Amino acid sequence: MKSLIEMTEALDHVTPGIASEHTLFYGVEAKFYSARPKVNDKFETKIKGLYVGGDGAGITRGLAQAGANGIWIARDIISRSN
Ligand SMILES: Cc1cc2nc3c(=O)[nH]c(=O)nc-3n(C[C@H](O)[C@H](O)[C@H](O)COP(=O)(O)OP(=O)(O)OC[C@H]3O[C@@H](n4cnc5c(N)ncnc54)[C@H](O)[C@@H]3O)c2cc1C
């Protein structure tokens, strides 16, 4: 608890107001993106028909981006099957 309080107080210097009485808890999210396979502009890997996308591939960093990335890939797959 002491560490969490210290962290919140330290954060208050960066983003003033966080250490107010209205903040019950604040968790810092750390993201690590080590995997980054090479893809073309359609998110297809060197292996024909193998696409990678979303956070796991290190391409996106949030829900909206990951969703949009999936739609982009799906459209390309559909266009090939037509
Ligand atoms: C605690 C937390 C809070 C977040 N809050 C926000 C937020 O407020 N706003 C925001 O935009 N983003 C937020 N994010 C990030 C967001 O959740 C991700 O960016 C998004 O879910 C990535 O979507 P994705 O489809 O790439 O991956 P995921 O949603 O992780 O989907 C990957 C899927 O693959 C499945 N899977 C894994 N391995 C295998 C396997 N071998 N075989 C079959 N399936 C497998 C997993 O079970 C999972 O269902 C948050 C993330 C976390 C962890």
Image (cartoon, helix red, strand yellow):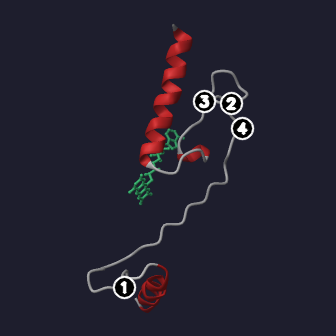
Q: Which residue is drawn at 56% across and 38% down?
A: 53
**Residue at figure coordinates x 42%, y 73% from the top left:** 27
Residue 73 image point, x, y percent: 53, 28
Lower position in the chain sequence, tag 4 or tag 3: 4
* Quadrant assignment for the N terminus: bottom left
How many angstroms separate mark 4 from mark 3 (CA)? 10 Å
The secondary structure type at the circle numbered 4 is loop
> Is 10 on the left-hand or right-hand side of 52?
left
Dot 3 falls on a residue whose secondary structure is loop
**Residue type at the position of mark 3:** Tyr
Is 55 displayed left or right of 27 in the figure?
right
Residue 64 percent location from the top left of the image: 42, 44
Callout 3: CB less than 8 Å from ligand 1: no
* Alpha carbon separation for disc pair 2 and 1: 45 Å
Q: Under tag 2, what secondary structure? A: loop
Q: In this view, does 44 lie above or below 20?
A: above
Residue of label 1: 19
Query: What residue is shown with label 4?
Result: 38
Q: Write down the residue under mark 3.
A: 51
Disc on the earlier residue, 1 or 3: 1
